[in-house]
Image (spheres, grey):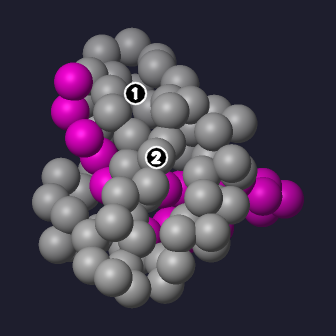
Amino acid sequence: MQKGYISFWEQDAAPHDDRMIYHFCSQAKDAAFWPNRPNAELKCIDLNRGVTIPAGGTHVCTNFQVEEFAPDKFLIYCESLSFPDSIE
């Protein structure tokens, strides 16, 4: 299993589409961060509804977790077989 950290996200450019596209990185130092654990945990609840990634077929990540990187930096990651740069 591989750890993928959320590095950034963006709104899908398709008209009338409210999907978010999430981008992942493999290094904690390159990840997006939240200023406190409660905010990061709230985002995990949203992400744990399921994020579909093309990992040797289609895989749905629902095991997002928070990792403390520094006292005021909390990261969100998911473990999967593999991660492309961006996923929806």
Q: Which residue is mark 2?
A: 65
Q: What is the x, y in percent for residue 42?
A: 68, 61
Q: What is the x, y in percent for residue 65?
A: 46, 46
Most distant residue in the top direction: 57
Instruction: Report helix, strand or loop for mark 2.
Output: strand
- Residue 76: in sight, yes or no? yes
**Label 2: how many residues lie within 10 Å, few (<14), some (14-19) or many (20+)?**
some
**Label 1: how many residues lie within 10 Å, few (<14), some (14-19) or many (20+)?**
some
Q: Are marks 1 and 2 in contact (CB under 8 Å)?
A: no
The quarter of the rendered structure image containing the N terminus is top left
Q: In the image, is 59 to the left or to the right of 11?
A: left
Q: Residue at x 24, y 57 (%)?
A: 25
Tell me how far mark 1 sits from mark 2, CA to CA: 20 Å
Q: Residue at x 40, y 71 (%)?
A: 74
Q: Residue at x 54, y 45 (%)?
A: 88
**Which quadrant of the figure has residue 6?**
bottom left
**Which quadrant of the figure has residue 81?**
top left
Amino acid of disc 2: Gln
Q: Which residue is mark 1?
A: 54
Ranked by sequence position, the earlier of labels 1 and 2 is 1
Instruction: Report helix, strand or loop for mark 1.
Output: strand
Amino acid of disc 1: Pro
Q: Nearer the viewer, residue 11 or 66?
A: 66
Q: In the image, is 46 to the left or to the right of 29?
A: right
Magenta segment: 1-24
Q: Residue at x 53, y 25 (%)?
A: 60
Q: What is the x, y in percent for residue 39?
A: 62, 72
Magenta portion: prevailing SS class: strand
Q: Is residue 6 magenta?
A: yes
